[in-house]
Amino acid sequence: QVQLVESGGGLVQPGDSLRLSCVASESISKIHGFGWYRQAPGKDHEWVAILANGVDTYTDSVKGRFTIYRDNAENTIYLQMNHLKPEDTATYYCNKLLRPLPWGQGTLVTVSS
């Protein structure tokens, strides 16, 4: 089955931007939907952004700041994060919407001054 590997996290200051990448081990062209999720320390996973059938949806706390998009040619799903806030600090994961995979290692985003 397809494997997903997240990258692009790091330590940034409030107001900065990051672009996260989720690279699939095989073609994603026939996978209809993906999501980005995050887990802050001591908390459960929460969904952040979903892209399905060309429609993107965001949790309220990131609307207007984050953008999810996919590049089928690169087998990659991206999360562009702008105007980052300290409360965005978390490990970020991507996953399929249908028959989700076990969580991978994710990529850590730390927003701190």
Image (cartoon, helix red, strand yellow):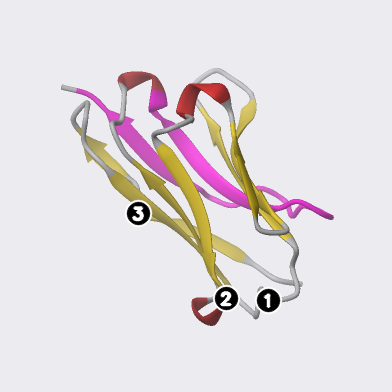
Helix, strand or loop under label 2: helix
* Residue type at numbered disc 2: Asn
Q: Residue at x 41, y 56 (%)?
A: 7
Q: Which residues are magenta?
A: 88-112
* Residue type at numbered disc 3: Gly
Q: Residue at x 31, y 23 (%)?
A: 85
**Disc 3: which residue:** 8
In 3D space, how far apart are the residues under numbered discs 1 and 2 (Cα atoms)?
5 Å
**Disc 1: which residue:** 29
Name the image quarter holding residue 37: top right
What is the crowding at mark 3: few (fewer than 14 residues within 10 Å), some, or many (at least 20)?
A: some
The numbered mark, 2 or 3, whose residue comes first in the sequence reads 3
**What is the x, y in percent for residue 103?**
65, 48
Q: Residue lying farthest right? A: 99
Q: How many marks?
A: 3
**Disc 2: which residue:** 72
For marks 1 and 3, give the one nearer the viewer. 1
Vertical placement of residue 72 versus 57, above or below: below
Vertical placement of residue 74 versus 7, above or below: below
Helix, strand or loop under label 1: loop
In 3D space, how far apart are the residues under numbered discs 2 and 3 (Cα atoms)?
19 Å
The numbered mark, 1 or 2, whose residue comes first in the sequence reads 1
Query: Which quadrant holds the C terminus?
Result: top left
In 3D space, how far apart are the residues under numbered discs 1 and 3 (Cα atoms)?
22 Å
* Residue type at numbered disc 1: Ser
**What is the x, y in percent for residue 62?**
47, 29
Query: Which quadrant holds the N terminus?
Result: bottom right
